[in-house]
Image: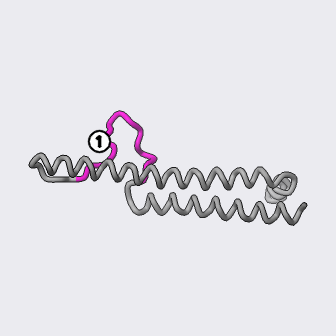
């Protein structure tokens, strides 16, 4: 199993570089989406508190019931998963570029 994977990497390291970049971009996108979602939640709570109601933060699923928001991080664990995905993508990209230089 691992020999097939190593042969795949050795034949064309650009594939792994592309995979690392995709992982890095996905993690970064998740973090940015979470920050935008956080801003939306806080702004809705502030608008509600200005109207005389208690400013309670609701989840994104409550604010946008018709949108699929299960993939947007709303907690520290979600942000940590996005950061881990970004760091893993960077690590894979750097390792693949290093191996590409060694094989060239």
- Specify whether 100 is left or right of 94: right
Number of other residues with Cα within 10 Å of mark 1, as a class: few under 14, some 14 to 19, many 20 or more: some
Residue 93 sits above or below residue 30 on the image: below
- Quarter the C terminus occupies: bottom right
Residue 94 sits above or below residue 56 on the image: below
- Residue drawn 84% across and 63% down? 101
Majority secondary structure of the magenta segment? loop
Q: Where is residue 41 in the image (x, y as percent from the top left)?
A: 30, 50
Q: Is mark 1 on a helix, strand or loop?
A: helix
Residue 49 sits above or below residue 79 on the image: above
Residue 85 painted magenta: no
Q: Position of residue 69 (x, y in %)?
A: 40, 43
Nearer the observer, 84 or 24: 24
Q: Where is residue 47 in the image (x, y as percent from the top left)?
A: 20, 47
- Residue drawn 20% across and 53% down? 56
Range shown magenta: 57-73
- Residue drawn 43% across and 49% down? 72
Circle 1 sits on which residue?
Answer: 63
Q: Position of residue 6 (x, y in %)?
A: 82, 58
- Specify whether 81 is left or right of 104: left
């Amino acid at each position: 199993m691992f020999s097939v994977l190593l042969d795949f990497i050795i034949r064309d390291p650009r594939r792994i570089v592309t995979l690392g970049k995709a992982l890095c971009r996905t993690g970064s996108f998740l973090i940015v989406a979470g920050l935008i979602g956080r801003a939306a939640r806080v702004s809705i709570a502030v608008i509600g508190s200005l109207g005389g109601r208690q400013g309670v933060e609701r989840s994104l699923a409550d604010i946008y019931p018709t949108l699929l928001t299960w993939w947007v991080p709303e907690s520290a664990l979600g942000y940590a998963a996005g950061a881990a995905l970004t760091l893993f993508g960077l690590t894979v990209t750097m390792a693949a570029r290093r191996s590409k230089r060694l094989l060239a």
